Image: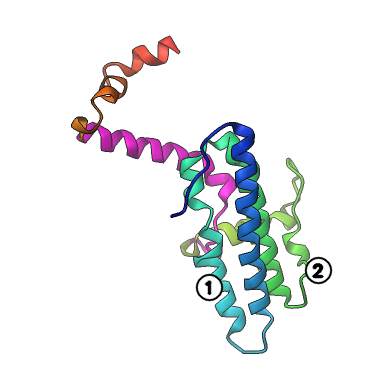
Amino acid sequence: ILGAPYGGEDWCRNWLEEKNAEIKTHFDAIAELGRHDDTNSAQCAFLLLKFSAATKFAHLLRMVPPPIVKEAATKHDDQVRECLSRLLSAVGPDCACPCFSRGLPGDDNWDAMLPQIQAALPTIQGGLGLGCAALTAAPAYLASWADYFGFMHGRRELAPVVNSEIDPANLPQRIAAD
């Protein structure tokens, strides 16, 4: 069971921080695998990064409101970039590829940002397919609510109390009241 935080904002942020620390151990193990002498170890490590470790945070983007998950999502993205950097450098845990150094918000240094963008792009668009949790947090959260409303609209008998709240005729009135 994956789980998600439920409670006050501070408690949720602490829970997400602990989850990031737990996932960090996976990134460290993948980077260690990439340094083995075997000719396929780097490719195996990258595949583990792409299809396993980098996606361990995705379910939280759909379940936690974006303002709460923003900081943790950014940290997760940093961990993905650091792991990729360690795989590309193959030198050691203290070596970071300079092309993945994080720019400051509002920084127009495209030379530093392009490798990050390309790593996040889907493979069909010429990227590495690692994604970006910070950028997808809000759309993922909204999509989960849209999916929930669609599911509940088709199964009104499951939660009769909720029916009046999600009835399309009542939504404009609810929005105006809030």
Please, what secondary structure does the residue beneath circle 2 have?
A: loop
Residue 7: quarter of image: top right
Mark 1 residue crowding within 10 angstroms, few (<14) / some (14–19) / many (20+): some
Q: At label 1, which amino acid type do we have? A: Leu
Q: Nearer the viewer, residue 172 or 158?
A: 158
Q: At label 2, which amino acid type do we have? A: Asp
Q: Position of residue 149 (x, y in %)?
A: 31, 33
| Magenta highlight range | 125-154
> Who comes first in sequence, dot 1 or dot 2?
1
Q: Is residue 174 magenta?
A: no
Residue on which the image places disc 1: 47
Identify the disc placed on residue 94.
2
Q: Along the horizontal axis of the image, is 11 left or right of 4?
A: right
Q: Position of residue 25 (x, y in %)?
A: 65, 64
Q: Nearer the viewer, residue 105 or 81?
A: 81
Residue at the extreme bottom: 38
Please, what secondary structure does the residue beneath circle 1 have?
A: helix
Q: Is residue 138 magenta?
A: yes
* Image point (53%, 73%), residue name: 47
* Residue 115 visible in the picture: no
